[in-house]
Image (cartoon, rainbow, N blue to C red):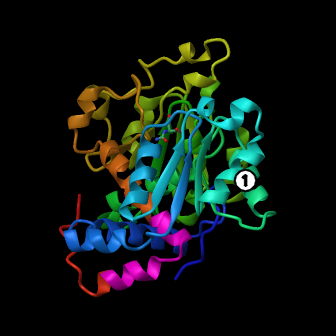
Amino acid sequence: MAGHLYHVLDTRGFDRPLLDELCELTTRLRGIAKSPEGARELQNLLPQARAMLYFPQPSTRTFLSFNNACHVLGIRTSEIRDPATSSEVKGESFDDSIRTFSSYVDVIVMRTPEAGFAARAAALMDRIARPVPIINAGSGKDQHPTQALLDIYTLARSFALRGGIDGKVIGMMGDLKRGRTVRSLCGLIKNYRDVELVFIAPKQFAMEGDIKLQLDAQGIRYRETSRLADALPGLDALYVTRMQTEWDTAGESRAMDYGQFSLNSATMKRLKPDAIVMHPLPRGPEIDTAVDEDPRAMYWRQERNGMWMRAAILLKIFRLEDRIFSLAAEGLPEGPDPP
Ligand code: NCD
């Protein structure tokens, strides 16, 4: 068994055995859930557990996938999505709010517009009598570790018959400066051998220096370009991101030239026949909907992977991974392996 998980705040601390185990758990879980007997077994795993989904920052996929991942495992959920409905409007501090949630639940999943708030909540937990694990579901422009984990699962599965993620060339395109998904994904690349990253963005939205320094320190090769057409033929995967317009202070996003930084049926012709296209979603004009029909478009599958990876993360936090491996070993019908 790989190491334990408690707080999930950023991508530090995820080593290869842990990533491999989470990916394996994810696949087993979704297989078991396919049969009614299996789904019932999963529902009985954590009937005593309660989760708080605290999402004052907008979310569709991450919220729904965590909510449903909890339900798959029998965990009951409470939620606050609009801070106007919580005592924050009466002036209750962030720390007191988090401490209050922890009085009622066994895990807190949170997304905030501020960077560092999940870490702050975790530090608070580490000081109180009844701490609960904190899962960062997106913190400002900085981190989105569970997205990076489901991205790794999607990459590993897509390349399962081609030696896995090792040795692949992964492009990241779009608003790399303000996109927390690509920042978090970069943090996991050190766990794979000989991966090369290609950052494709206009200068104004280039990857931030802190991530580049981190990659340098880890000996990971990366290059930067503003020419998508030139980069496309060399890629095994292209991770596309949208403009993070919510961070604009003076309409900066208008500087994005989608003529140069977007995918459509014509640009897809330059991508290798076995390459994959990913996107954390929601999408803007950077991927034409016509690309959805292309078998290399992996983003809807990536989205589906999210719920199962988040269920695997919860299982690992509650230390029930062995139950899944033994359930699978007992020969519960696992159902067909999904694509
Ligand atoms: C991402 C996010 O919230 O950072 N969405 C998601 O969780 N799938 C990406 C984005 O909003 O661009």
Residue 58 inside the magenta-drawn segment: no
State the image coordinates of residue 161 (x, y, percent, origin top left).
29, 66
- Element at badge 1? helix
State the image coordinates of residue 9 (x, y, percent, origin top left).
65, 55
Dominant SS in magenta:
helix
Residue drawn 31% across the image and 35% down it: 270
Q: Is residue 68 visible?
A: yes
Q: Is residue 265 left or right of residue 322?
A: left
Indicate yes or no: mark 1 CB to ligand 1 under 8 Å.
no
Is residue 43 or residue 150 the one in the foreground? 43
Q: Which residue is mark 1?
A: 99
- Residue 296 in the image: above or below residue 194: above
Q: Is residue 229 left or right of residue 32?
A: right
Is residue 209 or residue 179 the one in the foreground? 179
Quadrant location of residue 233? top left
Q: What amino acid does circle 1 point to?
A: Arg
State the image coordinates of residue 203 (x, y, percent, origin top left).
62, 25
Residue drawn 63% across the image and 67% down it: 6
Dot 1: few (<14), some (14–19), or many (≥20) neighbours within 10 Å?
some
Is residue 288 or residue 85 the one in the foreground? 85
Find the magenta span and give its range.
312-327
Residue drawn 33% across the image and 47% down it: 276
Total numbered badges shown on the rendered structure? 1
Is residue 99 or residue 111 the one in the foreground? 99
Q: Is residue 154 visible?
A: no
Residue drawn 50% across the image and 40% down it: 172
Please identify the quadrant where the C terminus is shown. bottom left
State the image coordinates of residue 236 (x, y, percent, origin top left).
38, 50
